[in-house]
Image: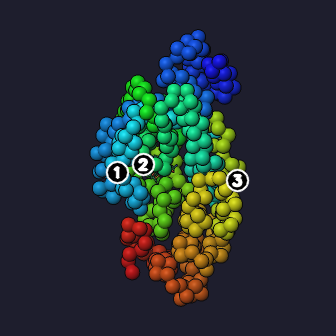
């Protein structure tokens, strides 16, 4: 009975990709096997029915190299302000330390492949670019829902205990996914799949069931280095090694303070996250568009006008980004990012949108409004505004932006050193 149902759901849900047809074959073989189907194969089949596009099994143990690489990452401070990463490194490095009862990790991937070239909007400087993962629903919500249903089914069918994880727990999802055969960690450090390229969200079910592991994914980057070369901010210190503090994804999403001057031009019009290293990967040639409609871009987020985004109030922001991952950075950080994109737009007609924010309640916003205007306005106009606004400025970082703006306009384009928190340290 269960197997018959499987076949029906599968035919309806899976798109005609290689992966789906390969699975359909497996499903009919399973049906003839009836109840004798081994738990691992039954679980694999069900995972696809629950909407996962990739599934693999690994022992619940620290993946090779992961512990040492994590220690080096933390010791060198490459996690920046993400201090939660250093709270429980032992648990993060080893699923057994996180949950001693765990025997097997079921690694799962959901395809979020874009519909077109995700880098094309970089040329539309009057618009903001949201990274592919943030153009619609929050994947945490989508994956968690599926993981809960799937994990409950495992317990109902085979007993044992389970725990589910997606992103936020101290779990090294990429090395575990590699150990479970979903792909390999590419030189851009993300998991690359032969079927879906760089576009898999990852989640996992830890279980007390002892299930035979799959073969680990083998590195197929070869001599390619496209991802390393394209990074606008030089975030890769070496192949397979990232300094998060230099990554635009970190700067625009995780970093709470002022964004260092040395990164602002390189950010271009990326207002939430970055996909450059993912998008250039040649393994994307086999990628297909996400089958989950909640990951297809919301029309308002595909080419949103910077001028309009800059005017979002706190309540507009919360309403506009309801259910979206963007919501978690809050209006001030978001408008900070938008103002950097405005400064990079080379469109003087966007200057009024920045000027309106010179008296904003947030120092993050005021600082980037000043910076944007220093990039867009003629020198006399910037000087006129400076006379009007700078004397009342009480926040040292914003006052410093006015001074740096004058220097920039005078042709002294100095990159002012920033502290690890992104605050200007010159004054
Ligand atoms: C912290 C974090 C970030 C940080 C740091 C990124 C990073 N690479 O660590 C920041 C904010 C920058 C970030 C950005 C992004 N992230 Co992120 N992030 C995470 C998080 C929470 C933890 C990752 C982690 O443990 N990092 C610590 C370091 C030590 O681990 P690592 O990168 O795996 O390092 C390995 C390699 O360096 C390797 N290594 C080191 N030296 C060497 C040498 C050799 C020879 C080899 C072979 C390997 C090797 O070993 C290390 C351990 O295996 C995970 C979720 C999770 N819980 O796992 C999501 C996660 C990695 N992020 C994800 C995504 C989608 C992104 C972005 C694409 C979002 C965007 N569009 O803006 C970018 C991509 C940037 C990039 N190139 O990595 C996805 C990736 C999915 C996938 N297919 O891999 C994850 C898994 C979330 C999820 N559940 O789907 N992220
Ligand atoms: S996401 Fe962008 S900034 Fe971060 S490492 Fe990749 S290319 Fe560089
Ligand atoms: S772009 Fe090239 S080097 Fe980078 S992850 Fe893809 S295959 Fe590997």
Decide which of tag 1 and tag 3 comes sooner along the chain: 1
Mark 1 or 3, which is nearer the eye? 1
Q: Can you identify the residue that label 3 sits on? A: 300
Callout 1 secondary element: helix
Packing grade of label 3 (10 A; few <14, some 14-19, many >=20) is few
Task: Give the Cα separation between the discs numbered 2 and 1.
Answer: 8 Å
Q: Can you identify the residue that label 1 sits on? A: 89
Quadrant of residue 174 within the rendered picture: top left
Q: In this view, does 19 lie above or below 264?
A: above
Asked whether residue 144 is in view, the answer is yes
Q: Is residue 212 above or below residue 166?
A: above
Callout 2 secondary element: loop
Callout 3 secondary element: helix
Q: Is 60 or 192 nearer to us in this picture?
A: 60
Label 3 CB less than 8 angstroms from ligand 1: no
Give residue 419's position: percent from left, percent from top.
38, 70
Residue name at image x 65 percent, y 18 percent: 1
Label 1 CB less than 8 angstroms from ligand 1: no
Residue name at image x 53 percent, y 88 percent: 391
Asked whether residue 123 is in view, the answer is no
Pointers 2 and 1 in contact (C-beta within 8 Å): yes
Task: Give the Cα separation between the discs numbered 3 and 2.
Answer: 34 Å
Decide which of tag 3 and tag 2 comes sooner along the chain: 2
- Disc assigned to residue 170: 2
Pointers 3 and 2 in contact (C-beta within 8 Å): no
Packing grade of label 2 (10 A; few <14, some 14-19, many >=20) is many
Residue name at image x 39 percent, y 33 percent: 103
Label 2 CB less than 8 angstroms from ligand 1: yes
Q: Is 344 or 297 nearer to us in this picture?
A: 297
Residue name at image x 60 percent, y 36 percent: 149
Mark 3 or 2, which is nearer the eye? 2
């Amino acid at each position: 009975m269960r197997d018959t149902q499987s076949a029906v759901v599968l035919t309806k849900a899976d798109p005609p990709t290689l992966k789906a047809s390969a699975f359909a074959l497996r499903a009919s073989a399973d049906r003839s096997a009836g109840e004798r189907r081994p738990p691992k194969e039954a679980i694999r089949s069900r995972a696809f029915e629950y909407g996962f596009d990739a599934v693999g099994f690994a022992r619940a143990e620290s993946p090779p190299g992961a512990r040492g690489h994590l220690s080096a990452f933390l010791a060198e401070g490459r996690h920046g302000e993400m201090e939660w990463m250093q709270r429980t490194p032992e648990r993060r490095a080893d699923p057994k330390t996180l949950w001693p009862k765990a025997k097997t990790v079921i690694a799962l991937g959901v395809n979020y492949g874009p519909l077109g070239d995700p880098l094309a909007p970089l040329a539309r400087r009057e618009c903001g670019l949201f990274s592919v993962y943030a153009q619609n629903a929050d994947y945490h919500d989508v994956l968690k829902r599926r993981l809960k249903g799937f994990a409950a089914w495992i317990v109902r069918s085979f007993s044992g205990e389970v725990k589910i994880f997606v992103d936020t727990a101290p779990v090294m999802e990429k090395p575990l996914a590699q150990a479970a055969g979903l792909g390999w960690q590419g030189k851009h450090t993300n998991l690359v799949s032969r079927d879906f390229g760089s576009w898999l969200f990852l989640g996992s079910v830890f279980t007390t069931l002892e299930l035979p592991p799959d073969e680990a994914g083998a590195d197929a980057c070869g001599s390619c280095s496209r991802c390393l070369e394209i990074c606008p901010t030089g975030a890769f210190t070496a192949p397979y090694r990232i300094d998060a503090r230099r990554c635009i994804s970190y700067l625009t999403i995780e970093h709470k303070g002022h964004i260092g001057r040395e990164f602002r031009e390189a950010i271009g019009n990326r207002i939430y996250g970055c996909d450059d290293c993912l998008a250039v990967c040649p393994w994307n040639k086999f990628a297909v568009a996400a089958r989950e409609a909640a990951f297809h871009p919301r029309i308002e987020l595909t080419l949103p006008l910077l001028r309009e985004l800059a005017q979002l109030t706190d309540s507009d922001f919360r309403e506009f980004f309801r259910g979206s991952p963007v919501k978690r950075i809050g209006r001030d950080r978001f408008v900070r990012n938008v103002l950097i994109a405005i400064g990079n737009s080379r469109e003087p007609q966007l200057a009024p949108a920045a000027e309106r924010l010179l008296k904003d309640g947030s120092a993050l916003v005021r600082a980037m409004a000043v910076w944007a205007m220093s990039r867009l306005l003629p020198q006399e106009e910037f000087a006129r505004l400076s006379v009007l606004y700078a004397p009342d400025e009480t926040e040292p970082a914003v006052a410093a932006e006015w001074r740096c703006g004058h220097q920039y306009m005078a042709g002294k384009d100095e990159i002012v050193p920033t502290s690890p928190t992104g605050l200007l340290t010159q004054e």
